[in-house]
Image (tube, helix red, strand yellow):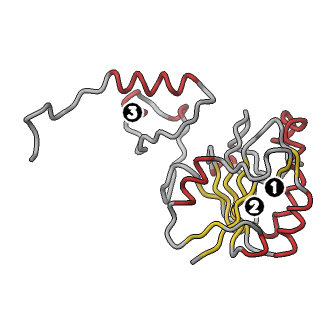
């Protein structure tokens, strides 16, 4: 049984507000038990989602550093430069347009020596800065994600035949997502009407 402590390293109402999608998936992992403190865990799961009310919990960051337990990051940042920004690179060029909003997360950079794996939303390997830990896709579970440059595609058929799957994972932060899903369901046609198909 692996003991896991989940945190956002925040205070002011955001101390344990780990992203619901992440927490739901964590709970489904077999042989895993959630614990209440970093001192009693085997692994720390740090979830990063931008929150306007976020305030760093310096004491929690220090506690995690003292335990020296491995840290796994679930990066769910949503901003204009998600594909490039890495939580522990607050001084990087990509942070410049967002510095006032994201600077409050910079104390979390102290966790970098303990990070063993980084799950990243908006994963684009070609745009990521170099990191001392592996960075992998959070949502699109694949061993390899081929990068496509739309400028290099010569036809609509090439674009339509890109070897990718369709994956839906969204929250209510954008009404367009719900409208898209509703439209897809509206246009759905059952390939096997009642009474037909394979028994």
Q: Tell me the element at label 3.
A: helix
Residue 48 as seen in the image, left or right of residue 188: right
Q: What residue is pinned by disc 3?
A: 160
Residue at (83, 51) in percent of width and height: 10
Earlier sequence position, callout 1 versus callout 2: 1
Tell me the residue that label 2 is attached to.
131
| Mark before the other along the chain sequence, 3 or 2 | 2
In whole angstroms, how far apart are the C-alphas of marks 3 and 2?
Answer: 33 Å
Which one is in front in this view, the residue at disc 3 or the one at disc 2?
2
The answer to whether residue 50 is left or right of residue 30 is right
Give the image location of residue 9, x and y in percent.
Answer: 81, 55
Q: Nearer the viewer, residue 41 or 168?
A: 41
In this rendered view, identify the residue nearer to me: 138 or 44: 44
Q: Residues within 10 Å of mark 3 (few under 14, many from 20)?
A: few
Cα separation between marks 3 and 1: 42 Å
Residue 4: quarter of image: bottom right
Mark 3 touches mark 2? (CB < 8 Å): no
- Name the residue located 55 percent from the left edge and 60 percent from the top edge: 27
Q: Which residue is mark 1?
A: 9
Relative image position of residue 42 (x, y in whole percent): 69, 76
Q: Residue at x 86, y 70 (%)?
A: 65
Image: 13 above or below 1: above
Residue at 57% over, 70% down: 32
Q: Position of residue 138 (x, y in %)?
A: 58, 52
Which badge, 3 or 1, comes first in the chain's sequence? 1
Seen in the picture, residue 170 relative to 138 is either above or below; the reply is above
* Residue in the foreground of this view, choosing between 101 and 149: 101
């Amino acid at each position: 049984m692996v003991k896991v402590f989940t945190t956002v390293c925040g205070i002011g109402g955001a101390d344990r507000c780990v992203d619901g999608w992440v927490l739901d998936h964590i709970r489904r992992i077999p042989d895993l038990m959630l614990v209440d403190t970093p001192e009693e865990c085997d692994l720390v799961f740090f979830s990063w989602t931008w929150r306007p009310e976020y305030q760093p919990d310096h004491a929690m960051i220090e506690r995690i550093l003292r335990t020296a337990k491995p840290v796994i990051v679930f990066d769910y940042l949503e901003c204009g430069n998600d594909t490039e920004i890495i939580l522990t690179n607050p001084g990087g060029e990509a942070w410049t347009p967002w510095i006032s909003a994201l600077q409050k997360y910079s104390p979390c950079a102290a966790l970098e020596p303990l990070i063993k794996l980084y799950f990243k939303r908006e994963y684009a390997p070609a745009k990521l800065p170099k990191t001392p830990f592996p960075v992998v896709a959070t949502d699109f579970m694949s061993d390899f994600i081929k990068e496509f440059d739309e400028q290099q595609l010569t036809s609509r058929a090439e674009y339509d035949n890109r070897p990718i799957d369709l994956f839906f994972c969204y929250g209510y932060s954008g009404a367009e997502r719900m409208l898209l899903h509703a439209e897809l369901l509206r246009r759905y046609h059952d390939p096997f009407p009642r009474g037909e198909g394979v028994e």
